Amino acid sequence: GAVVSQHPSWVICKSGTSVKIECRSLDFQATTMFWYRQFPKQSLMLMATSNEGSKATYEQGVEKDKFLINHASLTLSTLTVTSAHPEDSSFYICSAQNRGSGNTIYFGEGSWLTVV
Amino acid sequence: GENVEQHPSTLSVQEGDSAVIKCTYSDSASNYFPWYKQELGKGPQLIIDIRSNVGEKKDQRIAVTLNKTAKHFSLHITETQPEDSAVYFCAAIVDQAGTALIFGKGTTLSVSS
């Protein structure tokens, strides 16, 4: 199947700093990418929808100034957690939609963020 | 918006038995129903999907059935193996570009040998 690469797979940062997570579609162009957050033993919660070349659409309750999303190319979207706090610690997962394959959505391997 | 309910939340079976996970959805416009398997600490992996123009789809030991009238769909795993142990998520979506998946709460499947 299609490959979506996410980096880093895990990161530890200090409170107050920012951290960037990258999501790349390796073998298809992804006009649309999605960012999810997942807490232990819970389902995936959609944070935002990212369209190449335009501003991301955030879900209700997600702070757009805290979770900065950039989708500057058809193969790369980034999520930057700004001024991170311990409550931002979570598993962040991106997904990319392959419009050339029936709009099938593929997920990255996820990024574990721990804020200390 | 779409709401997806998934049952059961946990399922334990013996190796070789079958496992069935059921989901219901609320939006009658939804026409694409994928199933994802998530292993601990990893991202979800698409295992099978079905579109509303068919009622059943099978891929080796995995099958999905869809009842559009009742707005429910099910995942069937036959001859379960320990490596099938994972969390399974169903999702429903109106199949169009730019629309995000709405997931059920997940089912933790444990297959004991």
Image: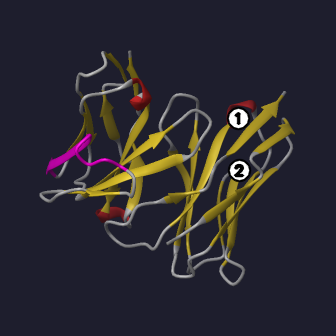
Q: Amino acid at mark 1?
A: Ser
Q: Position of residue A26 (x, y in %)?
A: 26, 42
Which circle's residue, 1 or 2, is located before the other in the chain?
2
The 10 Å Cα crowd at callout 1, few under 14, some 14 to 19, many 20 or more, is: many
Q: Is residue B72 above or below residue A111?
A: below
Q: CA distance from mark 1 to mark 2?
A: 14 Å
Chain containing the residue with disc 1: B
Residue denoted by label 1 = B85
Q: Is residue A50 left or right of residue B52?
A: left
User: Which residue is at 61% across, 74% downward?
Assistant: B26
Tell me which segment is drawn in magenta: A62-73
Q: Secondary structure at mark 2?
A: loop
How many marks on residues?
Answer: 2
The 10 Å Cα crowd at callout 2, few under 14, some 14 to 19, many 20 or more, is: few
Q: Position of residue A43 (x, y in %)?
A: 57, 46
Residue denoted by label 2 = B61
Q: Amino acid at mark 2?
A: Arg
Q: Position of residue B97 (x, y in %)?
A: 32, 69
